[in-house]
Image: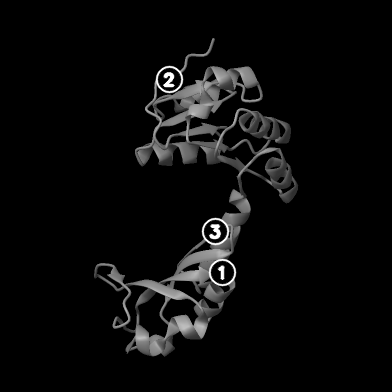
Amino acid sequence: MLAKPNFVKSDSVVVIGLGRFGASVARSLVASGHEVLAMDADEDIVQELASELPHVVRADSTDLQALQQLSVTDFSHAVVSIGANLEASVLTVLNLAQMGMKDIWAKANSPQHGRIAERVGAHHVIYPEADMGERVAHLVTGKMMDFIEFDDGFAIAKTRAPMETHNRTLAVSNVRKKHGITVVGIKRSHQDFIHAKPDTEVKPGDHLILAGPTPLIKQFAALY
């Protein structure tokens, strides 16, 4: 029988599949102070990560009984990061859904994979390669210095302040009314982050932190 770790499961996460993506997610969660149960069907991978992750076990997530023995539904969130094996990924999501898991995130390698994951119970689908590809494309062109897009078409980005905002307060340049986006803050070289207010003045060389619909963010960034 699988040994069940004893957790205080406040906002805890079970990460299933410890390839490059899954292991990175698990490490980041642990570093942020979350309780994490990491699992993989490959004993070699489990042994390799044993020194980095406090709770890592070998388990076959396509086996409903194995998941029940580990009480995975006691966790607040599940991340299914099995990308290479479509059948194992879908069966794992299905098992979690049947067990009543409240928040299931599934990594998908293709739109078809993602659609199947959603149909069997995934609440969120992640496309790491596609998402990173789009993010890098924005960075390479120089229009944005950082870019994060959410699944509802909303984005947060850092971009250089365009000339129309130079030496003007945000109230005067009126970015929100003209462009439909919000300036959340300003980062100026060698200075602390400035929370945006109507009387905040933008200087040449400033970096603006923006929030708003993705297409409008892109249009604004192209003004630089």
Q: Is residue 192 left or right of residue 196?
A: left
Q: Earlier in the sequence, mark 1 or mark 3?
A: 3
Instruction: Out of 144 and 214, give the one closest to the viewer.
Output: 214
Placement of 208 over or under 38, stated as above or below: below
Where residue 164 sits, quadrant-wise, is: bottom left
Using the numbered discs, state the Cα–Cα distance from disc 3 to disc 2 in whole angstroms.
Answer: 33 Å
The amino acid on which the numbered mark 3 sits, given as a three-letter code, is: Phe
Q: Earlier in the sequence, mark 3 or mark 2?
A: 2
Q: Please provide percent x and percent y for residue 73.
A: 53, 28
- Is disc 3 surrounded by few (<14), some (14 to 19) or many (20+) residues within 10 Å? few
* Label 3 element class: loop
Residue 214: give its label: 1
* Label 2 element class: loop
The amino acid on which the numbered mark 2 sits, given as a three-letter code, is: Pro
Using the numbered discs, state the Cα–Cα distance from disc 2 to disc 1 in whole angstroms.
Answer: 42 Å
For the point 59% across and 38% down, the residue is 81
For the point 61% across and 43% down, the residue is 107
Residue 150: give its label: 3
Q: How is the image coloured?
A: one colour
Residue 223 seen in this snapshot:
no
